[in-house]
Amino acid sequence: MKKRKYQLILITFLVIGFLLPGGQISFSQQQPPIKGIPKPTAPVVPIKLDISIRSHIQLSQEIQNRLIAVSRDLVTQNLSAELSRGLSSRAETNVIRQTPRGYIAETIVLNLLKNTYTAVMSRIEFSYEDGKTNIIKMDKIYQPRVAAVQTQVPKNINLEKAKLKILDSLTVATKPQVTYQPKGLVNTPCTEFPSAVNATNEIHAIMSQKFGGSVAKLIGNESTKDKVINFLKNDDSLLAWNNIGHGVTSSTNGAPCYGLVQWGQTIWHNELATLNPYSGIYGCVILTNSCNSYKDPLNSAIWSRQPRTYIGGNINLHVNRSEFVAKNFWNYTLLQGKTMRWSLEQAQRDKGYPVGTYGLRGDEGLFSRETGGGTSGGSGREDWPPTKMK
């Protein structure tokens, strides 16, 4: 009788426990895992990722779609935590070779960070054979070893004379020489950063005042790789170029820089090193407001096309701060007649950066030809920071 009474109490207790909202009964703190069943993993963080595919092997649309889907899965499963810290991400899958059972490919991922103009590069090499995927090698921070470009293009005397003539006309009290192509180029793909757009508009106004309105402006989806490259190749009137955007590098100050991110695509260092024709970049004063953009291989690639002056970031440059170093530089050198070296040093101080945050090589004199060093020289100093401050 007593035993039956205890059974009824226990049954009642169980029924009440299950009927109550949220009611649960546990007879142990943790159930042991079932053998052969993996423990559940943390949920994957959603990421924004655009993937394109490139192959020297002809692929059917079905295979292309499958490789893109495989790449997306690999990136999501292995790089989700890293990419969640970025603003957006993009990837390109390159088919390396075909095998008897499928393909060997790599996916290069660029993670565009939120607070600096840094695009961190990652790489996953994988096989896709018999419908199965296998990771061969993964680099969450990918920094390939690339030899710096040493060979410069030959001097182009006719092009130098043409650009010097345009420079000389800027000092005349009358209207500057009319050209059919812009004398200045300003661009940023970074519409997600109001500071990048505002600074680009302000630099455009500064250059327009100096160049009589002859300045091209590319913002957002206008700032494409093809359009920028077209100016650098073909604009034989181009005297000044300012780029604001992510540099392909790492989150480490002073790391190598491999390219400049544009809208949907990237201008890679090897493309700049082989740029031909190069009428726009030749004899041009260039400032790239991008992380580590003064570092090789990008620096040497740009310098191989013989610009007049090259300025780039020595560190990871901050959003909503570094852009106005660029703006102040152009204001000082174009409108106030200061030397390019002095202008860059003062522009860094204006925004609280130590001198040396940006690097400069080539002509560091006055922008205008009659007091500067010309398109092909100047003082020739390429050290940074300088031994003695001016």
Image (cartoon, rainbow, N blue to C red):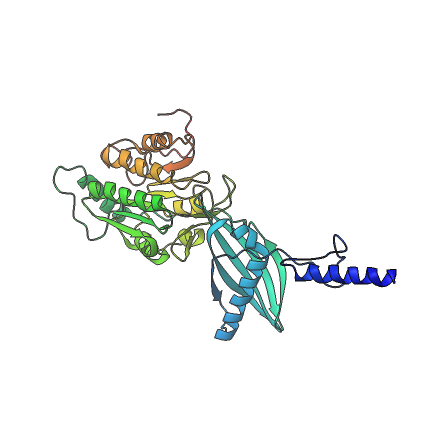
Determine whether 354 is above or below 300 in the image: above
Where residue 115 sits: x, y (%)? 44, 43
| Residue 94 in picture, x, y percent from top left | 51, 63
Instruction: Establish if 242 lies above or below 19.
Output: above
In this picture, residue 183 sits left or right of residue 45: left
The image quarter containing residue 164 is top left
Q: Where is residue 45 drawn, in percent x and y?
A: 54, 55
Give the residue drawn at x 27%, y 36%: 331
Which residue of the protein is positioned furthest toward the front in this rendering?
1
* Number of numbered discs: 0
Can residue 147 be seen here?
Answer: yes
Residue at image position (32%, 32%) is: 343
Say which quarter of the image contains residue 101.
bottom right
The quadrant of the picture occupied by the N terminus is bottom right
- The front one of 6 and 91 is 6
Residue 182 in the figure: left or right of residue 59: left
Tell me the quarter of the image containing the C terminus. top left
Q: Is residue 125 above or below residue 339?
A: below
Q: Say if 258 sits above or below 352 in the image.
A: below
- Comparing 77 with 350, the one in front is 77
Q: Where is residue 329 drawn, in percent x and y? A: 31, 36
- In screen coordinates, is 167 left or right of 135? left
Q: Which residue occupies the foreground of this view, 6 or 363?
A: 6
Tell me the residue at 26%/50% (across/down). Answer: 216
Residue 38 seen in this snapshot: no
